[in-house]
Image (tube, rainbow, N blue to C red):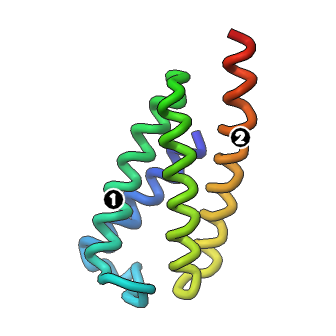
Amino acid sequence: MLLGLIAIFNIIDGIAAVSNSRYVADKLLFANLDAWGWFFLVWGVIQLLAAFAVYKEKTWGVVVAVITLFGNAITQLGAAEVNPVWSLTIVALDVYVMYALIVHTGGRRRAS
């Protein structure tokens, strides 16, 4: 569920950046706001698909989820200068979900 929530947050951030919303500050580490917006929009959709795959207990979903969560944590750290509370909250959620997926996936396989 948290993976889906993180995905929805990324989709909302992507849409806000692409639509030039005043909600998003245009102080980025590199590239421009449109590029970051499309990145987060696509990244969020991939995470949402991974969330559905994890829900259906697909191994590839866990792999995609961990990779996208790791990448999301790194990109959020890059945006920490602009909005530190939001970025660090998302990083904490990313790390928590990665931990839960990695620890609990092995147990699921052994029990089956």
* Quadrant of the drawing holding the C terminus: top right
Percent position of residue 101, x then y: 66, 38
Q: Nearer the viewer, residue 68 or 23?
A: 68
Q: Nearer the viewer, residue 55 or 109?
A: 109
Residue 67 higher or lower than 19, as above or below = above
Percent position of residue 24, x then y: 40, 80
Kind of residue indicated by mark 1 = Leu
* Quadrant of the drawing holding the N terminus: top right
Percent position of residue 85, x then y: 64, 76
Residue at 40% over, 53% down: 44
Residue 41 higher or lower than 52, as above or below = below
Quadrant in the rendering for residue 92: bottom right
Percent position of residue 42, x then y: 32, 55
Distance CA(mark 2)–CA(mark 1)? 24 Å
Around disc 2, counting alpha carbons within 10 Å, would you say few (fewer than 14), some (14 to 19), or many (20 or more)?
Answer: few
Q: Are marks 2 and 1 in contact (CB under 8 Å)?
A: no
Q: Nearer the viewer, residue 71 or 85?
A: 71
Instruction: Please tell me the numbered disc located at residue 78.
Output: none
Q: Which residue is mark 2?
A: 100
Around disc 1, counting alpha carbons within 10 Å, would you say few (fewer than 14), some (14 to 19), or many (20 or more)?
Answer: many
Dot 2 or dot 1: first in sequence order is 1
Kind of residue indicated by mark 2 = Ala
Name the side, left or right, on which 28 lies relative to 39. Answer: right
Quadrant in the rendering for residue 34: bottom left
Residue 49 higher or lower than 57, as above or below = below
Most distant residue in the bottom direction: 27
Residue at 37% over, 88% down: 26
Residue 29 higher or lower than 59, as above or below = below
Q: Which residue is mark 1?
A: 41
Quadrant in the rendering for residue 3: top right
Residue at 42% over, 43% down: 48
Q: Secondary structure at mark 2?
A: helix
